[in-house]
Amino acid sequence: MRIGIYGGTFNPPHQGHMLAARIALEALDLDRLILIPTAQPPHKDLPAGSPTAEDRLAMTNIAADNLLWPAISVSDLELRRAGRSYTADTIEALHRQYPDDELWFLMGADMFLSLQNWHEPERIMACAGIAGFARAADQEEELERQAELLRQKYQARVKVLRLHDTAEISSTQLREMLLQDKGWEYLVPAVRGYILMHGLYGTHADLRHLDLEDLRACSYSMVKAKRLAHIRGTEEEAVRLARRWGGDEELARKAGILHDCTKYLNLEEQLQLCEKYGIVLDELEQKAVKLLHAKTGAAIARHVFGMPEAICSAIFWHTTGKADMSLLEKILYMADYVEPNRRFDEVEELRRLAYSDLDAAVLRGCELSIVDMEERGQPVHRNTLEARDWLREH
Ligand code: ATP
Ligand code: MG
C-alpha cells in the first residue's frame, strides 16, 4: 500500500489543504491519505485564542469527510501524545504501524524548503519519501533545487508535485480575514458552520438569527457529508411543494435545511439531548435511535436556532407522521420521502401524487412505511398508524 501522511496545524483547515490533499492522492497514486493535526508545532506556538486541539481535530475531520473520499482519514496520533510534536516521532510510529507499506510525507513549500533544519530530519527521510508541493505559482524551480539537495544529503526519496492549481491562502491570513467576517469562501460550508456554532476565531454569530447560507452551514457541520445531497434535495423539494400547495416557502426551506441535523448522534447523545430539552419518550423511542433524530432535531431547531413552532413541529413529526398534520408537516414529510435522490420502486408514483393530492400522498407514504417496517420485522410507531387511520377517515 502507498500511504500519504499530511500533517499540519489545520487552524483552520482550508481550501489550500484540501486542494493539496486531492492532488497528492492522484499524483502519488495513494491508497490512503492520513491527515494528522499536530498538537503543538515545534517551530511555532499556536496563536493566542486558538481553538482547542479537539476543535481543530473536529474541523479536520469535517473537512476530510467533505472530500467524500473513502481513502482519506484523520489521525489523532499527535494530539494524544504529550509535549511537543516532532514529525520524526510521528513518522517512525507510522512506519512501525505500517512496516510493509510505502510512506510519503506531504508538505507545502514553506515546510519543504526548511526540512533540513527540522528536528532530526534524517529520521523522517529514513522512513518516508518526501513529497513537496508549491503553495504559490512559480515556486517549482526552487522546489526542484531543494529536492536535489535532500536527495544528496540524506539519500532521500523526494518528489516535487505539480499542482495545476494553487490556493494562495494560509490559515494565518484566513484567521485575520474571519475576524472581519471575510474569507469564508476558503472553507467548506460545514467547517464554516462548525466555526460559527462554536464561536471560533472571534466570530460571534447570533445562531438564532442566521441567514440561510449560515443556517445551511451549521446544519451541514453536524452531519456526514454523504447526507448533504439528501438534505439539499429535501430543502428544494419542500420549497416546490410549498409553492404547489400555498404553504410558506421560507418555513418549508428552513425545515428542510434542519430536518436531519441530529441524524448522526448516537443513542447516548440523543438521550442526553432528550433529557436536556425535556423530551418525553415512549418505550419504542427509547430504543429506536432512528426515531429520535426527529425529536432532537426539533429541539435543536427551537433552542439553538430559534426556529418558530411551525418548523419545529414539522421536524418533530417528519419521520413518523401523526394524525391531523399541518400543511408544513405534510410538506416536510413528503419532501423527505420523494426528494430527487430517493430511489425505491414506488417513488415516481408517490412524487406524482405529492403534487396532485397531498393527503393521498401522505397516506400512501404512511402505508408504504408500515409495510416496509412489517416486512423487516420491526415495530411500527403508533403515530404512523394514527396518521394512516386519520387520513383514511378524512
Ligand atoms: P498557518 O498560517 O497557521 O501556518 P497554514 O495555512 O500554513 O497555516 P498549516 O496547517 O501550517 O497551514 O499547513 C499544513 C500543511 O499544508 C503544510 O505542509 C503547508 O505547507 C500546507 N499548506 C497550507 N496551506 C496550503 C496551500 N494554500 N496550498 C498548498 N499547501 C498548503
Ligand atoms: Mg504554515
Image (cartoon, rainbow, N blue to C red):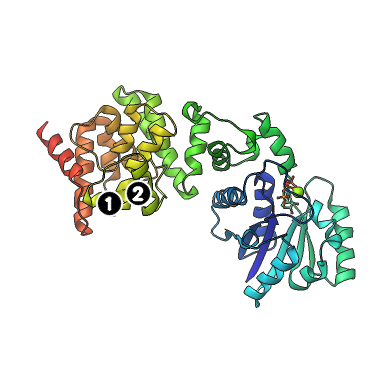
Q: Nearer the viewer, residue 103 or 218?
A: 218
Q: Nearer the viewer, residue 220 or 163?
A: 220
Residue 247 locus on image (x, y percent): 32, 23
Q: Residues within 10 Å of mark 1 (few under 14, many from 20)?
A: some
> How many angstroms separate mark 1 from mark 2 (CA)?
8 Å
Mark 2 crowdedness (10 Å alpha carbons): few <14, some 14-19, many ≥20? many
Seen from the viewer's position, the closer of residues 216 and 43 is 43
Q: Position of residue 42 (x, y in %)?
A: 77, 56
- The kind of residue on which mark 2 rests is Leu
Q: Is residue 40 left or right of residue 380?
A: right
Q: Residue at x 74, y 63 (%)?
A: 87
Q: Give the answer, above or below, for where 117 lies relative to 388.
A: below
Place residue 244 in its image quadrant: top left
Circle 2 is placed at which residue position? 271
Label 1 residue SS: helix
The residue that disc 1 covers is 286
Q: Is residue 227 left or right of residue 119?
A: left
Q: Residue at x 74, y 38 (%)?
A: 173
Q: Is residue 204 above or below residue 153?
A: above
**Disc 1 and disc 2 in contact, CB within 8 angstroms:** yes
Q: Is residue 389 visible?
A: yes
Q: Is residue 96 above or below residue 285?
A: below
Residue 62 drawn at (x, y percent): 55, 49
Count of marks placed on residues: 2
Q: In the picture, which quadrant includes the N terminus?
A: bottom right
